[in-house]
Amino acid sequence: MVKRGIAPYDAAPSLAALKMARCDGTQHARQGDADPDGYKADWCNRCCIKERDMGAAQSLLAMVIIDDNPRSLEFLSTALARPGLEIFSTTKPEDGLALVAMHRPQVVLTDVVMPGMSGLDVLQRVKQIDPAIDVVLMSAHEAGESEWKGFQQAADYLRKPISLSQLRQSVGRLIDKHQEQGRKP
C-alpha cells in the first residue's frame, strides 16, 4: 500500500495535514476531475490539498518513507509532516523504489531489515536512480562490519527506537538543505 500526503505552505501541520499523510488512495478522484467549486483537484477532492491551495507545485519537496511496519510508517509520516513537504510511504521496498523513480524525492527514509530487500539494497538502488537523493537508514538491529561500509553512503543512520527530536533533527536538516538549494523533485 502506498500513501501520499501534502502539507500546505502557509500553516503549521494541521489535523487535515496529518490526515493527508495517512491518505490510502481509496477516495481519490481521477486526475483532473473538478470539485464542486469548479477547481481541478491536484490529487483528490477529499484528503489532499488542491492545486489552488498549494501554490507552485514545483516548489514542493518530497520524501519517500519505506518501512515494513505499518505503525512505524504512520508514526514517521505524522511526525515528519511539515509545510511544503510531500510524503509518500509504503511497506514494500519495491514500491518505494518505484516511488523514488517516479517522484525523485530529496530524501528517502528506509528501514534496514525488511523482507525481500534490505535497506542497504534500497540505498544502492536509490543512488543508481539519483546520487543527489539523501538516504537515511534506520534499524533496531546492531550493525555488523559489512553493514557499516554500506551505512557510510547514507546521509544518516538512526537507531530504533528513534526519539521524535532525533528524527525531526536528522530529516529536518536534510529537508532544510534541499530547500536552501532550491532542488526540485
Image (cartoon, helix red, strand yellow):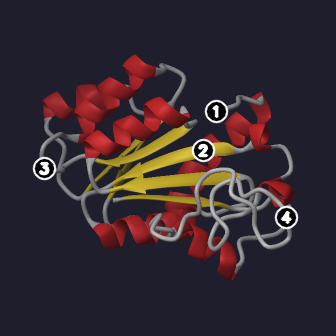
Label ID, residue 62: 2
Proximity of marks 2 and 3: CB atoms separated by less than 8 Å: no
Residue marked by disc 4: 38
Q: Name the mark nearer the viewer: 3 or 4.
A: 4
Query: In the structure shown, which secondary structural element does the residue marked by tag 1 occupy?
Result: loop
Proximity of marks 2 and 1: CB atoms separated by less than 8 Å: yes
Measured in 3D between alpha carbons, the distance from the residue under mark 3 to the one under mark 1, in whole angstroms, is 28 Å
Picture quadrant where residue 71 is located: bottom left
Crowd rating for badge 1 (residues with CA inside 10 Å; few <14, some 14–19, many 20+): some
Residue marked by disc 1: 185
Q: Residue at x 23, y 59 (%)?
A: 140
Query: In the structure shown, which secondary structural element does the residue marked by tag 3 occupy?
Result: loop
For the residue marked with disc 1, what is the amino acid? Pro
For the residue marked with disc 4, what is the amino acid? Gly
Q: Residue at x 66, y 52 (%)?
A: 85
Residue marked by disc 3: 115
- Residue 70 picture location, percent across and down: 31, 68
In the displayed structure image, the side of residue 54 where residue 78 appears, left or right: left
- In the image as oriented, which residue stretches furthest toward the bottom? 15
